[in-house]
Image (cartoon, rainbow, N blue to C red):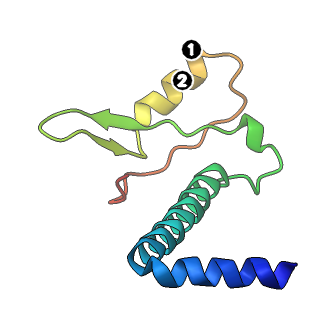
Amino acid sequence: MLSNYIKVAFRSLHRNRTFAALSTLGLGLSIACCVLIFLLVSHHLSIDRFHTKADRTVLVTTEAKGEVTSREGNVPYPMSMALRQEYAFLEKRRWFPPAKIRW
C-alpha cells in the first residue's frame, strides 16, 4: 500500500517538474528562515543568562537620535551614581566605560 502511494507521488512529481521544484525550493527556504529566526531569538534571549541572579540584572543603554538612530551600551558615569541614589531598590551598580560597540 505504501509503495503504491510512493509510486503515485513520483509520477505526479515527474509530470509537474516545475511545480515540484518550486514547491521543494520554497519549503527548503522557509525551513531555513525558521531555523535562522529561532537561532537569532534564542541567542538574544540567552545573553547574560549565565549569572546566578540573571532575572535581577539589567543593562541601561543610551539612544542617540539624529539622521540615524543608534543605541550604545553605555551611559555617562554620573548617571550610574544618580540611579543608585534615586532608586533605593537598586542593590549594586556597575559602570562600563564607553566602547566602540554599537547595536
Label 2 amino acid?
A: Leu
- Residue 60 pos. (x, y %): 50, 36
Q: Residue drawn at (55%, 40%), measured in percent from left and top?
A: 59
The alpha-carbon separation of the residues under discs 2 and 1 comes to 5 Å
Residue in front for this viewpoint, 50 or 28:
28
Q: Residue at x 21, y 32 (%)?
A: 65
Residue 28 seen anywhere in this rendered image of the structure: yes
Pick the quarter of the image with the N terminus.
Answer: bottom right
Tell me which corner region of the image, top left, top right, bottom left or bottom right, holds residue 71.
top left
Name the disc covering residue 86, or none.
1
Residue 76 showing in the rendered view:
no
Q: Are marks 2 and 1 in contact (CB under 8 Å)?
A: yes
* Crowd around label 1: few <14 · some 14–19 · many ≥20 (10 Å): few
Q: Is residue 64 left or right of residue 82?
A: left
* Residue 96 percent across, percent down from the top left: 49, 50
Q: Secondary structure at mark 2?
A: helix
Give the x, y percent position of residue 62. 37, 36
Query: In the image, what residue type sits under mark 1?
Result: Glu
State the residue in front, 22 or 34. 22
Extreme residue in the right direction: 1
Q: Is residue 4 above or below residue 97?
A: below
User: Which residue position is annotated with label 2?
Assistant: 83
Rendered image: mark on residue 39: none
Q: Is residue 4 above or below residue 89?
A: below
